[in-house]
Amino acid sequence: MKVELRRTTEALTFALLGALVFWTPNILVHWMIAYRFSGFVVLGLTTLLPATTILFFRKVSWPSLKQHSRPSQALFAVLGIWIAGPSMLTFSSSFCGGGLTQPDAWRFFVFGTFLFPVFTLVMSAFDGTFFALLLTTLLLPILVNSISKEAICGHK
């Protein structure tokens, strides 16, 4: 029972970390840019969000962890990014006059979170983070898996 609780806690921690590390820079960019959003901002977010997420987990979080558990932790981080997507995107769009500033925003907030796969994908396309979301979803588990294999093969 203690092992299951520890694994569940660890999975939730990585999901929360993934969501916070990926979406926080997006919220900060929307806060700073507000109505002056452009294609350059989209290119910046497409580079910034995957880079910060992958670097965070590679340099800060994963060096102290067991090599064989990294791929599953990467998947929980990606799952956290997708689940938190509607809420974080709703919050970030509030700086541009949308999101939580609109009537009935909380209803949208709740439904979007329950239907997160569709809402995260569609909302990220409107937010300018579509390609960043797809890149992180693909690269985080792949890079972590390749790092794990290199580390395991290096120790033999």
Image (cartoon, rainbow, N blue to C red):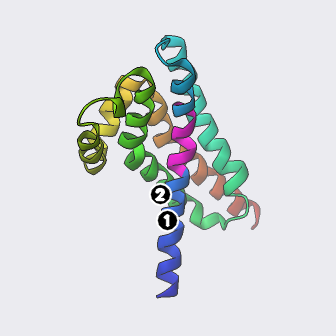
- Residue found 64% across the figure and 50% down from its top: 57
**Residue 11 — which label?**
1
Q: The residue under label 1 is which amino acid type?
A: Ala
Residue 101 shows in this picture: yes
Q: Position of residue 137 (x, y in %)?
A: 46, 42
Q: The residue under label 2 is which amino acid type?
A: Phe
Q: Give the range drawn in magenta.
A: 18-26
Quarter of the image with the C terminus is bottom right
Crowding near pointer 1: few (<14 within 10 Å), some, many (20+)?
Answer: many
Residue 141 shows in this picture: no
> Which residue is under mark 2?
76
Crowding near pointer 2: few (<14 within 10 Å), some, many (20+)?
Answer: many
- How far apart marks 2 and 1 lie (CA) works out to 6 Å
**Residue 53 — which label?**
none
Callouts 2 and 1 close, C-beta under 8 Å = yes
Q: Position of residue 150 (x, y in %)?
A: 69, 55
121 vs 29, left or right, is left
Name the image quarter holding residue 128.
top left
